[in-house]
Amino acid sequence: MTELTLVIGNKNYSSWSLRPWLAMQQAQLKFTEIRIPLYTPSSRQEILQYSCAGKVPILLHGNVKVWESLAICEYIAENFEPNLWPRDSIPRAIARSVSHEMHAGFQDLRNNMPMNCRARLPGKGMTTSVQKDIDRITEIWRDCRQNYGKEGGFLFGDFTIADAMYAPVVMRFVTYGVQLGAIEQAYVDTILQLRAMQSWLEAASQEQDAIANFEVPL
Ligand SMILES: N[C@@H](CCC(=O)N[C@@H](CS)C(=O)NCC(=O)O)C(=O)O
């Protein structure tokens, strides 16, 4: 089989990298990881070797290069593991909708509560507009769990790309100590218990680099 390589950023900070990495792990694919620490003097040049877009993650598969986290997840589902989307048309459409909503939105949450897996900053980063993003995300999680997720612990029962897309939000909620209801907290625990997630967090905790822009002051 043609080798798969995923180019990612720092595991502690790179929320976009976590998404396809987790989807590929859950699909039990073997792949090589190239980790480029972000925002160093050489980061941009190193990333540009792999993609003109100049951002991670990037998937390399033979001559194929795929950038943009959601496009990588789609490529993996189409070519390797179709069960990364729900099998039935309606839940699949909803899973795609909530995945795209994540991909395109929640800018206030992203800006004010950057992913920082190893930090614990309860109460930091909260604003009225961040709370609006949190309210919408938790509404999505409750709706998916209650209407499509009864067969398992994930948004659509079994693990799907929608869970990969929201995994960095789970980490943000943990880092910034966001108060959650019972359904959302149980979902957070389900994601945290994944072996792949544990392994990402372990690697993040070993990283030495600190990116000032992603560190919310104490
Ligand atoms: N929409 C892109 C976003 C990618 C992105 O912003 N990646 C960040 C790291 S999490 C990056 O490469 N930053 C480096 C830079 O902007 O120089 C995706 O879904 O992959």
Image: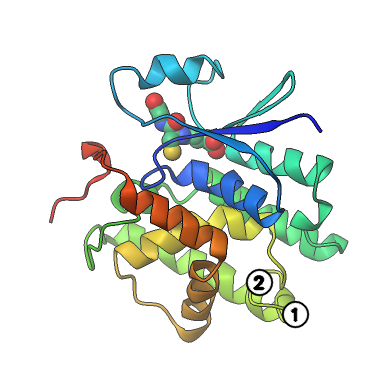
Residue 151: give its label: 1
Residue 201 in sight: yes
Above or below residue 215? Residue 47 is above
* Along the viewing direction, whichever of 202 and 91 lies nearer the viewer: 202
> Mark 2 or mark 1, which is nearer to you?
1
Q: Is residue 140 left or right of residue 198?
A: right
Q: Is residue 208 above or below residue 198?
A: above
Q: Are marks 2 and 1 in contact (CB under 8 Å)?
A: no
Residue at disc 2, CB closer than 8 Å to ligand 1: no
Q: Mark 1 packing: few (<14 Cα in 10 Å), some, or many (20+)?
A: few
Q: Quadrant of residue 30?
A: top right
Q: Nearer the viewer, residue 54 or 42?
A: 42
For marks 2 and 1, the one nearer the N-term is 2
**Residue type, numbered disc 1:** Glu
Residue under label 2, please give it. 144
Quarter of the rendering occupied by the C terminus: bottom left
Quarter placement of the N terminus: top right
- Up/down of 14 relative to 117, above or below: above
From mark 2 to mark 1, how far is it between C-alphas? 12 Å
